[in-house]
Image: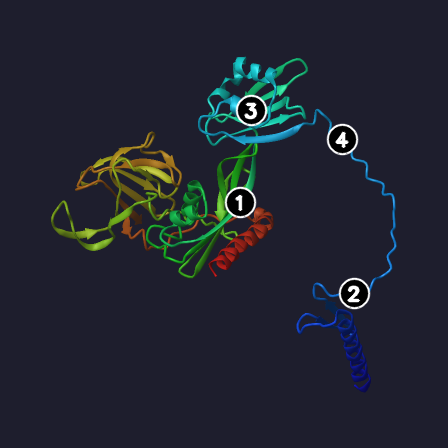
Amino acid sequence: MGANAGGDESILSKLRILAQTLKNIGGHVAPGRLVAVIVLMGAGIVAAFGLAPGALLPDMPTTLVRRDLVSPALSPLARDEGYWREERIQRGDTIGSVLARLSVTDHAAQNFLRTDARARTLYQLKPGKSVRVKTDEDGRLLTLSYLTQSGDLLTVRRGRDDFVASSGVPQATVRLELRAGEIRSSLFAAADAVGLPDAITSQIAEVFSGDVDFLHDVRRGDRFSVVYEMREVDGHPAGAGKVVAAEFVGKGTAYRAFLWRGADGSEGYYAEDGKSLRKAFLRSPLEFTRITSGFSMARFHPFMLTWRAHRGVDFAAPSGTPVRAAGDGKVMSAGRQNGYGNVVILQHSGAFSTVYAHLSRFAAGIKPGTHVAQGELIGYVGQTGWATGPHLHYEFRINNEQRDPLTIALPSAQPIPAADKSAFAERVAPLAVQLSLGRDVMLAGAD
């Protein structure tokens, strides 16, 4: 203890001597202009000092040192390697004005583009698209690429004697993107706010449709994060692909889904434990609509003008709205039946069957004996039979007894095959981390 105290006093004494020395040199050191910072580091003490601008210091001897440094060898850029440039097409642009902005000074190239039949699509430029060129250091065109409105990739290359133009289906690359958002009014509004493509938003609603009714169950403050595919052609976005992983948190409950592609080419969404997220039946045969009449034992019938049980759910929608099969099954009936009007009845596995009534017409190929898959088009909303307006009357039956499709617990599809469980777990682990990252970043931004 005494030794440490003595050491501290010795250092403080040296600090006072240094301060006095600076005062003698500079004449005066104003309070606060001399800065002393002492940092304790283990067994030693490090002191750092800063001097006020203008403080005078004694002349110190200096020595000029000259050394020759060897610069590293840099290989010059080969003339045929060229430089890539890209320019976005603006309204009123011509291929000539675009090439001028790209610093292409090549009369031979411009003559070829004017006369070659395959290159004529360059004279129908669409604002917002891009033209990419590769030139040499003299501005001569080596390569030009342009994604046409039809989706083909036009490529012009300088050959030994002349240019060659070719056009074909481009090779697309796929990258993954992560987005997360919080719902203020609706899922689509929240998705738009974070730049999520509409196709991906629709897939999210479809993936979780067995657990979440995005028309009626969504609340302010619900959150989502999603990892999805984005296709690129020639370095430019070319449309969204599939949802690869998604999370939806609603009413304090978190739902997660992961895409699994089987060796046989089949695709499905599963929870982290491998259970199928797809229910054996959809909650609603229509994608987006509103309920005008729910399942009830006593309802005033608008057509019969009497009180009677309503053993189904009525979904309001414009005439012609597509109606989907709620589950895999076989068409038992497709025709006209009294109050039902045009009706399709599907028989599913076990004791389950579903009814779709008041259709304006049937989908092509829908007839008794036809097998349909879940989500497959079976007809269109109409106003046939005992209906006062266009809507779909939907019934869910167990052993031919109507049950409320909005409240009944729906059975799930088959889980991940046992042979795929290990590969599935390996695939899911990094995607789960990305979903958590999206959620955490979103929450941090909200704070």
Rendered residue at 76%/65% (across/down) = 56
Label 3 and label 2: CA atoms lie apart by: 62 Å
Q: Residue 274, percent across and down?
A: 52, 51
**Horizontal side of residue 404 vs 413, given as left or right:** left
Q: Secondary structure at mark 3?
A: helix
- In this figure, which residue is indicated by the disc labeled 2? 57
**Horizontal side of residue 82 vs 201, given as left or right:** right
- In this figure, which residue is indicated by the disc labeled 4? 76
- In this figure, which residue is indicated by the disc labeled 1? 177
Looking at the rendered image, the disc whose residue lies closer to the viewer, 3 or 2, is 2
In terms of sequence position, does the residue under pointer 2 or pointer 4 come before the other?
2
Of the pair 377 and 246, the residue shown nearer to us: 246
Looking at the rendered image, the disc whose residue lies closer to the viewer, 4 or 1, is 4
In terms of sequence position, does the residue under pointer 1 or pointer 3 come before the other?
3
- Which amino acid, mark 1? Glu
- Which amino acid, mark 3? Leu
Using the image, determine if residue 362 lies above or below residue 12. Answer: above
In terms of sequence position, does the residue under pointer 3 or pointer 2 come before the other?
2
- In this figure, which residue is indicated by the disc labeled 3? 99
Label 4 and label 1: CA atoms lie apart by: 38 Å
- Check the picture and name the quadrant holding the N terminus: bottom right
Residue that lies at the very extreme toward the front in this rendered image: 27
